[in-house]
Image: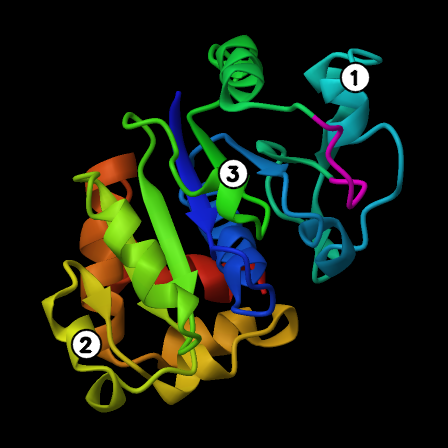
Amino acid sequence: MKAIAVYSGHKGGTGKSTVSVFLAIFLSLAGKSVMLLDLGGSVDFILENPSPPNVSSLFLGEVEWYEAARYVKLGGKLAGTRFALIPSSGYIPPGVSWNQVNDIINSMNEFFDLLIIDLPADPAWTLTPENIPVILVLDESPSSRKIVEKMSKFSNYFVIFNKCRIGRNRWLRNTPTLIPYDKNIASLNPSNLVNIYLSSSSRVLRPLNSYIRNVSGVEVGGNDKWLWKRVF
């Protein structure tokens, strides 16, 4: 099983959870079995998932992962029986570390092709394990530059700047695998995911396609757009 983490530093509202949901839905529709692990406390509100058991129950040892997992229903249709979600309660017990997250990942290893981890908006989670690719979803706040500088120690990370114009922040131009500002990205929300994806420009989709293909083996975009039209 391959894992991809989605992170926004200590700031919420950047579109991190929306990107997490987008990836989980598309990769499941592309034939992959996907688990979305919500540590960020917002995916469960986006998808309107029920309360306990949840991530907190899992970390406290009250349940196994398969007891906390839910199948996601979106747009009136089940988005593939292989798309599962473990929702957050909005609270992570004190002392939870990457070692515990890795234990959960290992326990799921035989059951899913891909794990999407929606990380908390907390600086303590900046340094992820080197074997987990990271998608950073950032805005123009001063902390964004520091986050990118920290992540530059890792080779496998990707940056999406939401509501951010490159011309105002020249340091961004040297950021690897950067998705530039696009009005479609700035308007992302759960209700318009499909339309935004279909209307996004090639300069935005091309680098994202390449990154997702490299870490998951799935091509996002191109001829795969029919998947969205078929389901929605």
Picture coordinates of residue 141, whole percent (x, y): 44, 75
> From mark 1 to mark 2, how far is it between C-alphas?
44 Å
Distance in Å between CA atoms under marks 3 and 2: 26 Å
Query: Compared with residue 195, is residue 112 higher up or lower down, i.e. above or below?
Result: above
Q: Looking at the image, can residue 217 be seen?
A: no
Q: What residue would you read off at disc 2? A: 203
The image quadrant that residue 66 belongs to is: top right
Q: Amino acid at mark 2?
A: Arg
The answer to whether 80 appears left or right of 77 in the picture is left
Q: Nearer the viewer, mark 1 or mark 2?
A: 1
Q: Quadrant of residue 167?
A: bottom left
Task: Compare marks 1 and 2 and give the one earlier in the sequence.
Answer: 1
The C terminus sits in image quarter: bottom right
Judge left or right: residue 168 versus residue 24.
Answer: left
Q: Position of residue 91 (x, y in %)?
A: 78, 40
Instruction: Give amino acid for label 3.
Output: Ile
Q: Secondary structure at mark 2?
A: helix
Q: Secondary structure at mark 3?
A: strand
Q: Which mark is residue 117?
A: 3
Which quadrant of the structure image shows residue 181?
bottom left
Relative to residue 209, is residue 102 drawn left or right? right
Residue at image coords 64%, 40% = 38
Residue at image location 43% in from the left, 57% down from the top:
227
Q: Which of labels 3 and 1 is toward the front?
A: 1
Disc 3 crowd, CA 10 A, few/some/many (<14, 14-19, 20+): many
Q: Residue at x 16, y 39 (%)?
A: 155
Q: Is residue 48 magenta?
A: no
Q: Reading the chain from its start, which is encountered first: label 3 or label 1? A: 1
Q: Kindly identify the residue that appears in the image at 54 percent across and 57 percent down.
A: 10
Residue interval drawn in magenta: 88-94
* Residue 53, image x, y percentages: 85, 27
Regarding mark 1 in the picture, which secondary structure is present there? loop
